[in-house]
Image: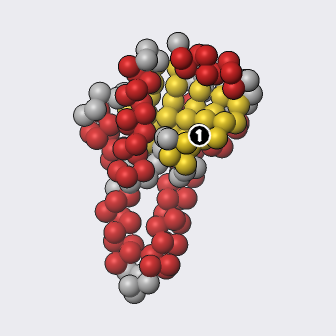
Amino acid sequence: MKIVIATIGSRGDVQPYVNLAQGLLSAGHDVRLASNPTLDSLVASHGVPFIPVGSPVDMGAEGARLLEKSFDNMWIGLMRVMQLGARLVEEAYPDTLEVCKDAALVITSDTGSGVAEAEKLTSRGSASHSNPLGCRWSTSEPRARLDAQLAG
């Protein structure tokens, strides 16, 4: 099954999906992870095919910079980091939509990357994760059919 995992964020947002991709690859699926270009080496170093989408912004470094500028106020810092993340997901939309066009299943992350794209491609399945250990299914195919395809 051709699967795209779409996630944009810092290393901490993307690393769990690298591990998920490794498991899906081991099960014989055609998997690609789509994320911001700065994470290419991280993903590739684990043997997962990578597709860069959006702007090359290091979310970890940029998030730390935004937090430092927030007057030691965690809430202001959090809002600034969330605004940056939302902007990056929005900017990556055209690239992510193109990547998802041929996928049978789109796995999205809690950053929201891939959600609108999967919904636009209504014939595709979409597994939306708050983390790879828990899954909420939103798909045009019956869940049992997708489970069977994932099982090989």
Q: Measured along the vertical axis of the image, is residue 62 above or below residue 120?
A: below
**How far across and down, in percent of the image, does residue 7 sit?**
48, 44
**How far across and down, in percent of the image, does residue 152 sit?**
53, 12
**How far across and down, in percent of the image, does residue 32 sit?**
44, 28
Residue shown at the point (33%, 44%) measured from the top left: 39
Residue shown at the point (68%, 21%) measured from the top left: 144
Residue 48 seen anywhere in this rendered image of the structure: yes
Q: Measured along the vertical axis of the image, is residue 146 above or below residue 34?
A: above
**How far across and down, in percent of the image, does residue 25 sit?**
40, 21
Most distant residue in the bottom direction: 71
Q: Measured along the vertical axis of the image, is residue 141 above or below residue 118?
A: above
Q: Measured along the vertical axis of the image, is residue 60 above or below residue 38?
A: below
The residue where tag 1 is placed is 135
Q: Quadrant of residue 74?
A: bottom left
Q: Secondary structure at mark 1?
A: strand
Residue shown at the point (55%, 20%) measured from the top left: 150
Residue shown at the point (40%, 26%) measured from the top left: 23
* 116 with respect to 50 (left or right): right
Residue 95 seen anywhere in this rendered image of the structure: no
* 59 with respect to 42 (left or right): right
Quarter occupied by the N terminus:
top right
The kind of residue tagged 1 is: Cys
* 38 with respect to 137 (left or right): left
